[in-house]
Amino acid sequence: MNDAGTGSSLVFFLLLAVMFAAMYFLVWRPQARQQKQRREMLAGLKKGDRVVTIGGIRGVITGLKEDTVTVRVADKVELELDRSGIGYLRGKGEGA
C-alpha cells in the first residue's frame, strides 16, 4: 500500500514541475524578453523618430530629456510626454 502512495506523489510532483516549466517558457520568458525590447526602444529614442503614443497619437520626436519626450503632432502643436507614453516606433515606409 505504501508503494502506491509514493508513486502517486512522484507523478504529482513531476506534473507540477512540467506545469511550472510550461508557464516559464510560455508566459514569463516571452514577457521578460518583450519588456527588455521595450526598455531598449525607449532608451534608443532620438530626435526625428516617428512614434505612436500608447494613446494612438502619431508624431515626430522634437526634443528629449531624461524622463520626457516632446512630440510634434501637427504644425505648431507639440506634446510633452513621459518616455513610457511612447507605444512604438513607426516604420520608415509609413506615411505621416
Image (cartoon, helix red, strand yellow):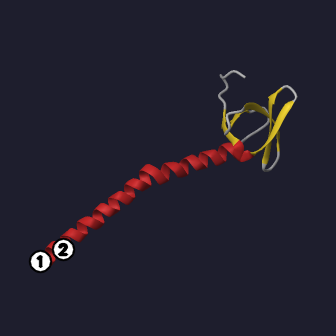
Q: Is residue 19 above or below residue 76?
A: below
Q: In the rendered image, which quarter is residue 58 located in?
A: top right
Q: Position of residue 40 (x, y in %)?
A: 65, 46
Rendered location of residue 83, percent (x, y): 74, 46
Q: Position of residue 29 (x, y in %)?
A: 48, 52
x 85%, y 25%: residue: 75
- The residue that disc 2 covers is 5
Dot 2 lies on which element?
A: helix
Which quarter of the rendered picture does the C terminus lie within?
Answer: top right
User: Can you identify the residue that label 1 sits on?
Assistant: 1
The amino acid type of the residue labelled 2 equals Gly
Determine whether, in the image, residue 7 is placed left or right of residue 51. left
Q: Amino acid at mark 1?
A: Met
Residue reaching furthest to the bottom: 2
- Of the pair 58 and 13, the residue shown nearer to us: 58
Real-space Cα distance between discs 1 and 2?
7 Å
Question: Which element is circle 1 on?
Answer: loop
User: Mark 1 near mark 2, Cβ–Cβ under 8 Å?
Assistant: yes
Quarter where residue 16 is shown? bottom left
Question: Residue drawn 20% across and 69% down?
Answer: 8
Front-lying residue, 85 or 6: 85
- Res 10 label: none
User: Residue drawn at (46%, 51%), measured in percent from left and top?
Assistant: 27
Density class for disc 1 (Cα within 10 Å; few <14, some 14-19, many ≥20) is few
Q: Residue at x 66, y 30 (%)?
A: 90
